[in-house]
Image: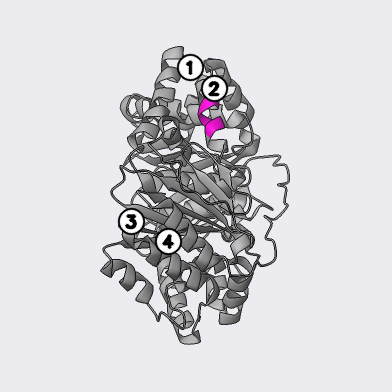
């Protein structure tokens, strides 16, 4: 999409520099592991707990992650994960609707949540001496959510309106949604995280409550606390509040493969819009494949700033595009996509823009980028890491995100892989993955008001 589909992996170096962490005071629990800057403990009920102490952090962070993203839904029930995220703020017998956020706010903190294809997470930022509030409140709503039918109906209407604003009324988002749906035949990335409108309308309170009881269990969750925290006190509080919650059934990611794509797929979206737009998506591997590092560098070579190939080629020289981009993120549980996208300059045909995009890819296939380009791309990736290294919130998020992908230690492997990428590697992955038969293309055809094509 025009707004870059950013790769969070560009910030993994946060842990390379590290912080001053106190190694004292961690009491042993089930499967406790000691690290220089990070503590990991698995409670008897299966809850994974991470603690990261940074005495320089002004705030503390609490995050809880559930293996309950949209990949765990099914046809006809899409949107369950996201709608449940909304309902998690609607109260328990002890804390009524909207009380959760009010308690955090009164304590001087902020809270929020997010749902993705692979997981859902809830987080708060608080003064260290107020962190106990997060622990109490999150443990309570892990097991005691009310899910009142009236609140459920009202929040369903809220989500339907959100879907209308973010997708149905956003032409480029609609193109992205159509491309994802056409690109994947079997992997559940084919439906949007927010869900299809017809499914959202049909989700019942019982659907949501069953999903909640199945997925919001300790052995399907990760808790991470970070900041200038009292390690002993915080971990004891977590054990006390969460330790008594019984484990549920083990949740596994769907064991699915994707049928081989044997030819280009194309979709068209006719929607009221100002300018034509194109999105081309190529099948690509996730982080478990060594080629992912070179694909990351390739994306940066193509569109890492105004001196990059796509910007210079389509915007400065050929002057066919108003905006253009390449993006790729391997932080997915399943194989993913490498994207090229562009918005046509007024008066330019989208066919001309598409041709110019592919010409930039062919240039790299025919001749590898020079060492200077590749070095610059690597430096940009490293700079992205370093720019975020002061954020204790983001450090905590990275640990949990990688643990959700299988192992938080994957973050260490990533930067080593980036450093090893050569110009020949970049050329090789372009030749291997950016091919017509593995491509799905979405084209926005702008309509005038009233429905006629421009």
Bin the neighbour count of mark 4 within 10 Å (Cα to Cα): few under 14, some 14-19, many 20 and up. some
Looking at the image, which residue is at 46% across and 86% down?
150
The magenta-colored residue range is 412-416
Residue 70 in sight: yes
| Residue 359, numbered label | none
Point out the tag, 2 or 4, that comes first from the N-terminus. Answer: 4
Query: How far separated are the C-alphas under marks 3 and 2?
Result: 45 Å
Point out the tag, 4 or 1, that comes first from the N-terminus. Answer: 4
In the image, residue 265 sits, relative to residue 308, either above or below, namely below
Query: How far separated are the C-alphas under marks 1 and 2?
Result: 8 Å
Query: How far separated are the C-alphas under marks 1 and 3?
Result: 49 Å
Looking at the image, which residue is at 56% across and 31% down?
413
Query: How far separated are the C-alphas under marks 2 and 4?
Result: 36 Å
Report helix, strand or loop for mark 4.
Answer: strand
Q: Cβ–Cβ below 8 Å for labels 2 and 4?
A: no
Taking the magenta stretch, the answer to whether it contains residue 314 is no
> Which residue in the structure is indicated by mark 2?
426
Looking at the image, which residue is at 51% across and 55% down?
177
Report helix, strand or loop for mark 2.
Answer: helix
> Which residue in the structure is indicated by mark 4?
113
Q: Cβ–Cβ below 8 Å for labels 1 and 2?
A: yes
> Which residue in the structure is indicated by mark 1?
369
Looking at the rendered image, the disc whose residue lies closer to the viewer, 2 or 4, is: 4
Residue 262's spot in the image, x, y percent? 71, 39
Point out the tag, 3 or 4, that comes first from the N-terminus. Answer: 4
> Which residue in the structure is indicated by mark 3?
128
Looking at the rendered image, the disc whose residue lies closer to the viewer, 1 or 3, is: 3
Is 134 placed left or right of 258 in the picture? left
Query: How far separated are the C-alphas under marks 4 and 1?
Result: 41 Å
């Amino acid at each position: 999409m025009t707004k870059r589909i950013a790769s969070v992996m560009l910030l993994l170096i946060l842990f390379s520099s590290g912080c001053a962490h106190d190694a004292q005071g961690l009491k042993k629990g089930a499967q406790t592991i000691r690290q220089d800057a990070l503590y990991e403990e698995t409670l008897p009920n299966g809850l994974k707990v991470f603690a990261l102490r940074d005495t320089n952090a002004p705030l503390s962070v609490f995050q809880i992650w559930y293996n309950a993203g949209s990949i765990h839904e099914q046809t006809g029930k899409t949107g369950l994960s996201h709608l449940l995220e909304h309902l998690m703020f609607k109260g328990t017998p002890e804390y009524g609707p909207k009380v959760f956020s009010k308690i955090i706010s009164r304590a001087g903190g902020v809270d929020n949540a997010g749902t993705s294809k692979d997981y859902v997470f809830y987080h708060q930022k608080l003064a260290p001496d107020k962190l106990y509030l997060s622990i109490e409140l999150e443990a309570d709503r892990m097991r005691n959510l009310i899910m009142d039918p009236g609140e459920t109906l009202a929040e369903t209407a809220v989500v339907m309106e959100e879907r209308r604003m973010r997708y149905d009324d956003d032409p480029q988002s609609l193109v992205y949604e159509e491309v994802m749906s056409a690109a994947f035949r079997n992997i559940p990335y084919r439906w949007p995280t927010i869900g299809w409108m017809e499914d959202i309308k049909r989700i019942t309170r019982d659907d949501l409550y069953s999903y909640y009881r199945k997925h919001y269990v300790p052995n399907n969750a990760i808790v991470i606390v970070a900041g200038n925290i009292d390690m002993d006190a915080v971990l004891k509080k977590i054990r006390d509040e969460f330790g008594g919650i019984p484990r549920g059934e083990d949740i596994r990611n769907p064991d699915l493969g994707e049928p081989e794509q044997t030819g280009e797929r194309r979709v068209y979206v006719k929607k009221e819009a100002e300018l034509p737009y194109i999105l081309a998506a190529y099948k690509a591997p996730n982080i478990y494949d060594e080629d992912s590092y070179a694909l990351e560098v390739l994306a940066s070579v193509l569109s890492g700033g105004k001196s990059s190939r796509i910007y210079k080629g389509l915007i400065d020289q050929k002057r066919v595009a108003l905006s253009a981009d390449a993006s790729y993120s391997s932080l997915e549980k399943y194989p993913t996509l490498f994207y090229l996208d562009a918005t046509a300059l007024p008066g330019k045909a989208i066919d001309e823009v598409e041709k110019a995009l592919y010409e930039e890819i062919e240039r790299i296939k025919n001749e590898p980028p020079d060492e200077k380009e590749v070095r610059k791309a690597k430096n940009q990736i490293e700079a992205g890491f370093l720019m975020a290294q002061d954020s204790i919130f983001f450090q905590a998020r990275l640990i949990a995100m990688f643990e959700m992908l299988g192992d938080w230690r994957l973050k260490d492997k990533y930067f080593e892989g980036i450093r090893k990428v050569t110009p020949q590697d970049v050329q090789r992955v372009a030749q291997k993955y950016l091919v017509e038969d593995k491509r799905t293309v979405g084209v926005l055809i702008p309509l005038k008001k009233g429905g006629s094509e421009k």
